[in-house]
Amino acid sequence: MKKVISTLAFVALLFVAQNANSQACGTSIPCIPLGGPPSGGFGSQDSTPCIVQGVPYSKAVQFTMFASFQFAGSQTVDSIEFLSIDNLPCGLCWSVDQEDKRYSANEDGCLNFTGTTNDTIGQYKLAVSVKAWINNVATGQTIPANVFDQTGVKILLRVKSSTGACVPADTSAAAELTNVYANTANCNGLGINETSRPFYGVTMVPNPMNSNGTLSFMSETTGTYSVRVSNAIGSVVSYKEIDAKQGVNTVTIERNSLPNGVYFISLSDGKNVTTHRFSITE
């Protein structure tokens, strides 16, 4: 198990670009789990209808949680928790049917994608970060999106125009080279090419938080980053600058006197920014 954890930590240092949009839907209507393939995992990529530009969308991807997966050998699954999903078409958000976003081995679940997008036509390979309780170890291991990819799980969404055809999902090796989190749009409208962003694997846990939380991210280089927390109407309620190191970085986010509610935390190096939604509860 120590070898597996060390391998995960090593692979987590590899660079993967992600679209800024990792919006969780929060209180959206959950999907109804119907079960995935008998062997576990997610349904056919072509079973998820295309998103039409400018048209409201709400569709579910069905799954049955894996009982095991292959990464540095066979790993036995106790449970998996969804932490974040990046590279969504701008304007879309995601939700699952479990409030704690955690699923035991062989448990049915569904990922629901909701919203309206005018993002670029094409295929979006989602960047899924999870926490995995594996091999009967009590402590869950955080698996960032680039490591999650190594297990062979791919979740795709496709965007088309109102008059265009829904092109079949492309899971070929060639698509892997050209569609690795290929959405370069910045959902905050800043026009930044996300393929040049020097940080990735951003997560905020716990979410919801009570007294404090932890923002984690991977940085390609050392540098000064800003961490900004805004409330639901856009007012900045917390701001700090940190000196990031190359590799894994963590920042404690204090609640202080903030009331219950929905907040947005933004991480920026001055040129690039990513924003995640979280909530505060008692």
Image: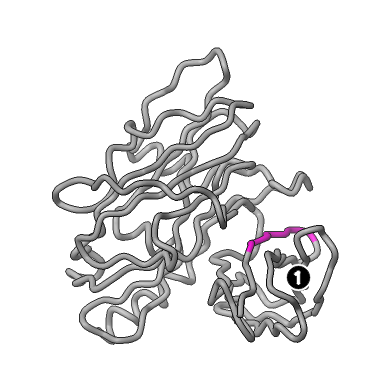
* Residue identified by numbered label 1: 229
Residue situated in front as seen by the camera: 189 or 38: 38
Crowdedness near tag 1: few (<14), some (14–19) or many (≥20) residues, C-alpha within 10 Å: many
Instruction: Please say which color scheme the image uses.
Output: one colour
Which quadrant, please, contains the C terminus? bottom right
Residue drawn 63% across the image and 42% down it: 90
Residue drawn 57% across the image and 20% down it: 161
Residue 201 in the image, given as x and y percentages of width and height: 54, 66
Quadrant of the image occupied by residue 8: bottom left
Residue drawn 19% across the image and 60% down it: 106
Residue drawn 39% across the image and 61% down it: 98
Mainly helix, strand or loop, the magenta region?
Answer: strand
Report if residue 151 lies within the magenta region: no
Determine whether 195 is above or below 255 in the image: above
Quadrant of the image occupied by residue 146: bottom left
Q: Give the total of numbered labels.
A: 1
Numbered range of the magenta stretch: 271-277
Residue 71 in the image, given as x and y percentages of width and height: 26, 66
Furthest toward the left, the residue is: 38
What's the amino acid at mark 1?
A: Val
Quadrant of the image occupied by residue 216: bottom right
Residue situated in front as seen by the camera: 44 or 192: 44
